[in-house]
Image (cartoon, rainbow, N blue to C red):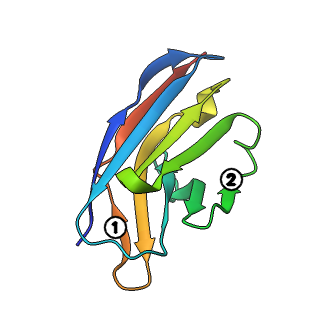
């Protein structure tokens, strides 16, 4: 099964930037999706941005234009560049992998805190 290791995150002020990175290991299907979800306290987990191996990207409406997701297929990695951060972006961010064989796999989560 795929295992995911995240890095990045931290604390910034409003308007700042952070970069999250995730590397996957294990058996991956050629067609898969990797990306990022987040969960704020007492809120459900929500998609932030995902990208499939064909290059199609989905962004949450409230991050469109501020966040950029990218992948290195050969290195099994996905990165989230977060710009113009807002306090409402504060959450625990999870790296996600999905394929038709094993479904969803999750990283351990990395905290992002944006202060006003």
Q: Secondary structure at mark 1?
A: strand
Determine which of the numbered discs, if any, sits on residue 50 in the image.
none
Considering the image in quadrants, where does the N terminus appear?
bottom left
Identity of the residue drawn at 22% across and 66% down = 26
Identity of the residue drawn at 68% across and 53% down = 59
106 above or below 109?
below
Considering the image in quadrants, where does the C terminus appear?
top right
115 above or below 54?
above
Residue 53 placed where, x, y %? Answer: 54, 66
Indicate left or right for 99 with 102 as reference: right
Q: Secondary structure at mark 2?
A: strand
Furthest-bottom residue in this view: 101
Residue 76 placed where, x, y %? Answer: 37, 55
For label 1, the residue is 105
Q: How many marks?
A: 2
Identity of the residue drawn at 33% across and 49% down = 23
**Res 93 → quadrant:** top left
């Amino acid at each position: 099964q795929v295992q995911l290791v995240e890095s990045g995150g931290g604390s910034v002020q409003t308007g700042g930037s952070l970069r999250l990175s995730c590397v996957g290991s294990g058996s991956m299907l050629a067609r898969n999706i990797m990306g990022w979800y987040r969960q704020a306290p007492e809120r459900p987990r929500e998609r932030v941005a995902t990208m499939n191996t064909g290059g199609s990207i989905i962004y949450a409406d409230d991050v469109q234009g501020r966040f950029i997701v990218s992948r290195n297929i050969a290195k099994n990695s996905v990165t989230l560049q977060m710009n113009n951060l807002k306090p409402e972006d504060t959450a625990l961010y999870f790296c996600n992998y999905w394929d038709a064989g094993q479904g969803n796999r999750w990283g351990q989560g990395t905290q992002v805190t944006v202060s006003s």
